Each structure stands twice: as structure tokens, then as C-alpha cells.
Image (spheres, helix red, strand yellow):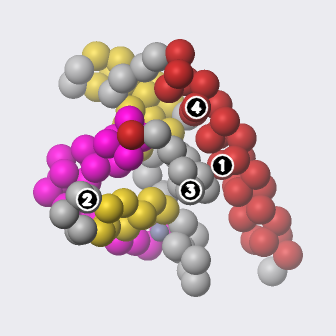
Amino acid sequence: MKFYGGEDGICWKLKFYANKEYSGIYDKSIKDVIERFNYKYVGCYGCGKCKKEKAGYNIEYDDGRKYFRCGFELIPIKTISKDIVEEAVKMMEIQDRKFIEEIKQTLIK
Ligand SMILES: [Zn+2]
């Protein structure tokens, strides 16, 4: 997780791609970042982690459009509340286990 000064004041970013389920605010945050760059940064752009299993976010719009956003980049979250932070903490634990798994796989090679 990282805090930074964004256009709208202090924002925060995090990685949570190991999580298969998350609430609407996180789904919207992925869509926001994809839309901000006009769908230019979808798919994997050489993160080195995407192999057979892609390490990132699969998102779907109501009209059926589907996109993959590589997990290499942090996702900016524009809002903050107790619920959102509590969810982030749970997601970070899951993400942490994924990172440890990835490190182990790298070390075994
Ligand atoms: Zn990737």
C-alpha cells in the first residue's frame, strides 16, 4: 500500500489481485484507472509475473465487456472509510500470502 498526493488531494493505492472477490468501490477503482487511460493499459505489459495464470484483475462491465488489468501496477483508491480500510486489511493478508507464494516459486527455480 502506498499513499501519494493525487489530483484530488491525498490518495492511496494498493495491490489486491490475489483477491477474487471485493466490494464495488474496488471494482470501480480498477475501472476508473482503465478508463482514465482510455483502455490503453489493459492486458499484461510484461510484468514478468503473468504466466499460465495471469496475475491481475479480471473485470466485467454490465454490457458484457471484459478486460484484464495486470496486477503489476497499484490501483488508486479515491475514497476512504472504515469499511473500505477493513476490507483492504483483509485483502492485503490474502495478497501477502500470494506474494510469499510467488517468492517461494522464484527461489525454487
Ligand atoms: Zn502481468
Q: CA distance from mark 4 to mark 3?
A: 13 Å
Secondary structure beneath dot 3 equals loop
Quadrant placement of the C terminus: bottom right
Q: Residue at x 35, y 71 (%)?
A: 43
Closer mark to the observer between disc 4 and disc 1: 4
Q: CA distance from mark 2 to mark 4?
A: 22 Å
Where is mark 3, residue-wise? 20
Q: Answer with mark 1 or mark 3, whichever residue precedes in sequence.
A: 3
Q: Residue at x 35, y 18 (%)?
A: 10
Examine the image and state in which quarter residue 9 appears: top left
The boundaries of the magenta stretch are 25-48
| Residue 101 in the image: above or below residue 11 | below
Q: Position of residue 14 (x, y in %)?
A: 50, 39
Q: CA distance from mark 1 to mark 3?
A: 10 Å
Where is mark 2, residue-wise? 61
Q: Is residue 38 magenta?
A: yes
Q: Which mark is residue 87?
A: 4
Q: Position of residue 66 (x, y in %)?
A: 30, 69
Q: CA distance from mark 4 to mark 1?
A: 12 Å
Secondary structure beneath dot 4 equals helix
Give 68 or 2, whichever is nearer the viewer: 68
Give 57 or 36, whichever is nearer the viewer: 57
Where is mark 1, residue-wise? 95
